[in-house]
Image: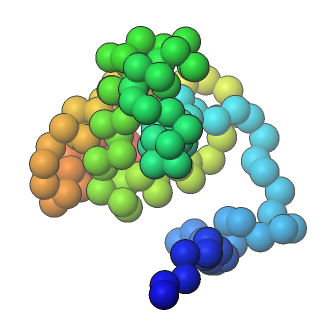
Amino acid sequence: MTDTSPLEIQFSLRTKLGTVINSPDARPAEGRLRQITRVPALAIHFDEMIRRGQVKDFADIGRLSCLCRERVSQMMRLNYLAPDIQMELLYLPPVPRGRFPISETAVPKIANLLSWHDQREQWRQLKRACALA
């Protein structure tokens, strides 16, 4: 007989500078989250809803979120990004004001590439072109 009880894993993420991201004493930065951060987070949430059986398909998500199926499909494609690129996007600091140099429309083009190696190369080029690397 196998145990099917849920498993919870807790861990702390550290930035390159050594600061802990999810520590209780960490204060959130001022500003608003970038669209390029919100959309992949939503895609992960929608994927979890499908896995749990809360929704059947993209059409259900579209009805619940007031988005068309095509937009939901575009968002869900971001789940195919290499894990390290997803982490970079999810942990971008909030923007105090103004626009972020990388648009939300540039990232799905990278997600369409089948190879994570190619995705990483395109991501590096995009960051270099936007003076972020």
Residue at 53% x, 29% y is 35
Q: Does residue 63 appear to the left or right of 112 in the view shown?
A: right
Residue 109's spot in the image, x, y percent?
Answer: 22, 32
Figure label count: 0
Q: Is residue 104 visible?
A: yes
Q: Is residue 128 visible?
A: no
Vertical relation: 105 (above or below) 34: above
Residue at 19% x, 57% y is 116
Residue 132's spot in the image, x, y percent?
Answer: 41, 46
Vertical relation: 21 (above or below) 106: below
Residue 34's spot in the image, x, y percent?
Answer: 57, 33
- Residue lying farthest bottom? 1
Vertical relation: 35 (above or below) 121: above
- Residue lying farthest front? 1
Q: Does residue 35 appear to the left or right of 58 in the view shown?
A: right
How was the colour assigned to the protein in this rendering? rainbow
Residue at 55% x, 75% y is 4
Foreground residue, 75 or 29? 75
Vertical relation: 127 (above or below) 11: above
Q: Does residue 33 appear to the left or right of 119 in the view shown?
A: right
Residue at 25% x, 41% y is 111
Foreground residue, 43 or 13? 43
Foreground residue, 77 or 47? 47
Quadrant position of residue 95:
top right
- Residue lying farthest right? 25
